[in-house]
Image (cartoon, grey):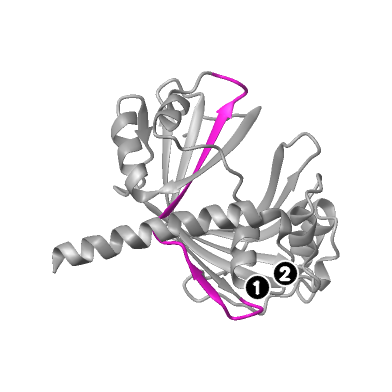
Amino acid sequence: MSGIKLMNRTDTKFVTTVDRLKLLLMLARDDYRAQEIEGKRIASYYTAYFDTPDNNMYIVHQNGHAGRQKLRIRSYVDSGLNYLEVKTKNNHGRTKKKRVDMLGFDPLNPDHGIRFQRQDAQYRSYDDFLRRHLRYDPTVLSEHLENHFNRITLVNKAKTERLTIDTGLRFHNLVTGKEADLTGLVIIELKRDGLQPSPILGLLRELRIKPSGFSKYCMGSALTNPGLKRNNFKERLHMIERLMGRINQQESKNTRHDY
């Protein structure tokens, strides 16, 4: 992985189902290697997203504004690494990420009462970090949404691209208490160096898996908070509904066959 820097990368997302993913992996097996850590090729992730009391980070994204930002805690559950991250998407569609260690955070028993007040040395350092990289006042932010998912990471043999494959996606809204389970749905993100040729793009086209934007924070929020505006997300929400309907139909069919 250290050889895959991708300093001038472009990101493209695709949404599909586990059944289509199985076909994709079979077709791609000669062109890609899978990341393996301590014998495991599937890693568990946890994320907690922060927002303002009026959901401004969500609203800015929903309204299609460039230069938007998100703040999250990202936990690599298996390795015990936790980071406080600021993601900024600029006017050219590029995403920059700044992060610091989130010390003492436990994704298996997360603290949902985190506030970025300067109460001790640790939180003073968070406050300094956020005021350098975030355009929002850190003291008004609180956790709005959490999710869990599993990730497979592939690298092509030319080392010009990285492919992340997220499955088992589940959301819990910390404001409304509502949950959304998207198990069976797959989020694929292709991260490649500039416009280098990509073996996976032809395979995705062959399987009729088309590019589709998918912000985990925005989709999770729209699915679990009925009070949020979602006009610009309607097409993606309908796509999710169609795919989940197909997944549930297939599961029902499999259950009948098992019986």
Q: Quadrant of residue 194?
A: top right
Left or right of 9? Residue 210 is left
Q: Residue furthest left?
A: 259
Direction from residue 153 to residue 114 in the image, left or right? right
Residue, disc 1: 225
Residue at x-position 62% and y-position 69%: 145
The residue closer to the viewer here, 130 or 124, is 130
Dot 1 crowding, Cα within 10 Å, few <14, some 14–19, many 20+: some
Q: Quadrant of the C terminus?
A: bottom left
Could you tell me residue 61's position as x and y percent? Answer: 75, 54
Up/down of 29 relative to 47, above or below: above
Q: Is mark 2 on a helix, strand or loop?
A: loop
Identify the amino acid type marked 2.
Leu
**Residue range corresponding to the magenta coloring:** 174-196
Under tag 1, what secondary structure? Answer: loop
For image coordinates 63% across by 30% down, the residue present is 9
- The local crowd at label 2, few if under 14, some if 14 to 19, many if 20 or more residues have their Cα within 10 Å, is some
Q: Which amino acid does label 1 sit on?
A: Asn
Contact check, label 2 and label 1, Cβ < 8 Å: yes
Number of numbered discs on residues: 2
Identify the residue shown where x is 42% and y is 60%.
Answer: 245
Q: Quadrant of residue 176?
A: bottom right
Q: Is residue 145 above or below residue 92?
A: below
Q: Name the residue under label 2.
A: 228
Q: Residue at x 81, y 45 (%)?
A: 67
Residue 159 picture location, percent across and down: 47, 24
Given residues 83 and 202, the one toward you in this image is: 202
Return the x and y of residue 198 as percentages of the image width and height: 48, 23
Find out whether residue 189 is within the magenta segment. yes
